[in-house]
Image (tube, rainbow, N blue to C red):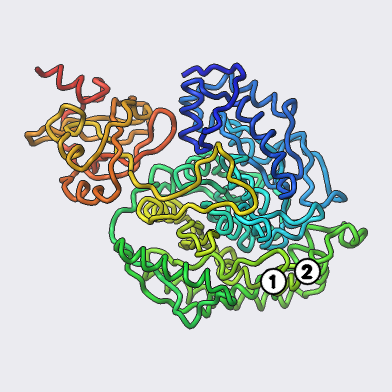
Amino acid sequence: MSVNMTNSSTNNSLDMGFSALRAAYQTGSATPASVMADIRERAKAYADHNIWIHLLTEAEQAVWLEALKDKDIDSHPLWGIPFAIKDNIDLAGIPTTAGCEAFAYTPELSSQVVQQLIDAGAIPVGKTNLDQFATGLNGTRSPLGACHNAFHYDYISGGSSSGSAVAVALGLASFSLGTDTAGSGRIPACFNNLVGVKPSIGLLSATGLVPACRSLDCITIFAYNTDDANIALAAAEGFDQRDGYSRQNPFANQARHYGLHTGPLKVGVIPAHQLKFFGDEGYEKAYWQTLNLLKEQGFEFQEIDYAPFDEIAQLLYEGPWVSERYLATQPLIDENPDAIFPVVREIIAPGGKPPATALFKAQYRIQDLKQICLAQMAQIDCLLTPTAGRHFTIAEMLEEPIKRNSELGYYTNFMNLIDLASIAVPTVMTDHDMPFGITLVGPTFSDRMLMSIANRIQQTLPLAKGTLEVMAAPTNITPVGSPKTIDVMVCGAHLQGQPLNWQLTERGATLKAKTTTAPVYRMYALAGGPPFRPGLILDTGTGGEAIEVEIWSMPVDNFGSFVAGIPAPLGIGKIQLADGTQVTGFICEPYGIEGAQEITRFKGWRAYLESIR
């Protein structure tokens, strides 16, 4: 589909989510240029939040906006989507500082992840503030000043990916890139009401990333919801021969499997005596409220022993891995230590001292503990923890910066040391309208499984909408809140005017859109009936077609009874639409097409029915 690229004023009510932006582009109510101009204008109101190290100018963005003219919106899932980049990740022609001017350099090439996102149509907004050299979980360790929370100016944003999270939370980007060594892709998500994806190590290339601990680092994604996060992750992931830690993504962890986890769940939780909230009664109450709400949705909880996870977590900063941070900053810390932020220098400077024997001893201990942790995780679908135990004010953090930063990492520091995947998910607001969230944890390459569970939580858990206490929320952002309806894709007997359409309408569903799938599906007329039914099968080869479908909006409370009535081999999964978005809809198990007639060439159920009349 071609899209009008002429500049126009952005609608003040424009939602910055992927689907809404793409719809605005396709209808002509907004253009990428107008959205970027609006972001630059609105960013002025948040100058005191210290979000940006380098906000791109219109001239600096021109090359990417111009390139969109040669990119088809239907085949570029991030077409015109604005994203922010943590300033330890390279963007060609723009300085990378890692929060330290004395370290700055200007790369000729973008990092592989950034380039893949641009190739998919995304437009960089700017480079964001961070805890210097990605050393910290709080967002106050920057020479540019503390990055302030999106919901309350006096509170920390979380770090080190502070600016990246706040940019999305305030509607200055649709998604952003952070990094995560100890929790930097999760803590800021929790504090700013976002989804934070910490992928398996090596799923996203680290080429073009300034390392903190190279063996542990992950590039991460902040987004409003799991659908957007999944689209961004699919565009960003990929093996990179240049990165020694890059790994091939197994088939079972690819984007097509997002949203398919629909069965019973056994979720690991931490026993009450091992939980720590560090005096934050609001967060403690929000955690138990979250568990109670999930239990009502059928989540089954099983306690695990958190002691081995905690022991691993302590080794990250108290063990020899600080030597990796030391290596990342040489020779600056040796030759010009005053150029480094004082607290960061205090943490990194001792990293040149641990002997190799200390590293081996720590590695041996971690291997022993890892066996214990993984054995426990093998008994559950995922582990669920608070993302953070307490939300500190900036003043509180500055009083005891090292101690309180360590407390922030109580639930996060262990993950990369034993090669786990995780996703932070917002759940409820505290009594003081501050965000709270949980983190789902799974083994290596469980990324899509975890994201599917997170998607279930976002569809069923009634999230409260927070209010900004310092200044009003931007008028062009729809806050992430409780989804009261769910979009359901139908392609056969449930279509408008067809025999089973009543199953939608009696549940209060309304027709939202008539559209097509992405051109990667085959359709079959299944045996049996009446009513006769089609089966939709994913085909990423050369045989797929765009199939006509309808999208119906159904009250969430009625969705369960609707799904319960779906007979095998049909089921519910995620279907990719022509605009690149994914929606819940009818899928067919492969065994169901045995003996069925392929009707793909008709490109829709109605056309097929016409052919046999």
Q: Residue at x 59, y 41 (%)?
A: 474
Mark earlier in primary sequence (2, 1): 1
Crowd band around label 1 with a 10 angstrom C-alpha radius: few (<14), some (14–19), many (20+): some
| Number of marks in picture | 2
Left of 39 or right of it: where is 516? Answer: left
Judge whether 192 appears above or below 548 on screen.
Answer: below
Left of 395 or right of it: where is 553? Answer: left
**Residue sitting at the far bottom:** 273
Say if residue 292 shows up in the picture: yes
Q: Check contact, mark 2 vs mark 1: CB within 8 A.
A: yes
Q: Nearer the viewer, residue 224 or 85?
A: 224
Left of 265 or right of it: where is 244? Answer: right
Q: Nearer the viewer, residue 221 or 483?
A: 483
Mark 2: amino acid? Ile
Image coordinates for residue 90, horizontal then vertical, percent: 72, 42
On residue 347, which mark appears? 2
State the SS at label 1. helix
Quadrant occupied by the C terminus: top left
Image coordinates for residue 450, horizontal then vertical, percent: 43, 56
Crowd band around label 2 with a 10 angstrom C-alpha radius: few (<14), some (14–19), many (20+): some
Say if residue 197 shows up in the picture: no
Q: Residue at x 11, y 35 (%)?
A: 527
Image coordinates for residue 547, horizontal then vertical, percent: 30, 26
Mark 1: amino acid? Tyr
On residue 546, which mark appears? none
Left of 295 or right of it: where is 105? Answer: right
Q: Residue at x 15, y 29 (%)?
A: 498
Image coordinates for residue 610, horizontal then vertical, percent: 15, 17
Q: Quadrant of residue 343?
A: bottom right
Q: Nearer the viewer, residue 387 or 242?
A: 387
State the SS at label 2. helix
On residue 317, which mark appears? 1
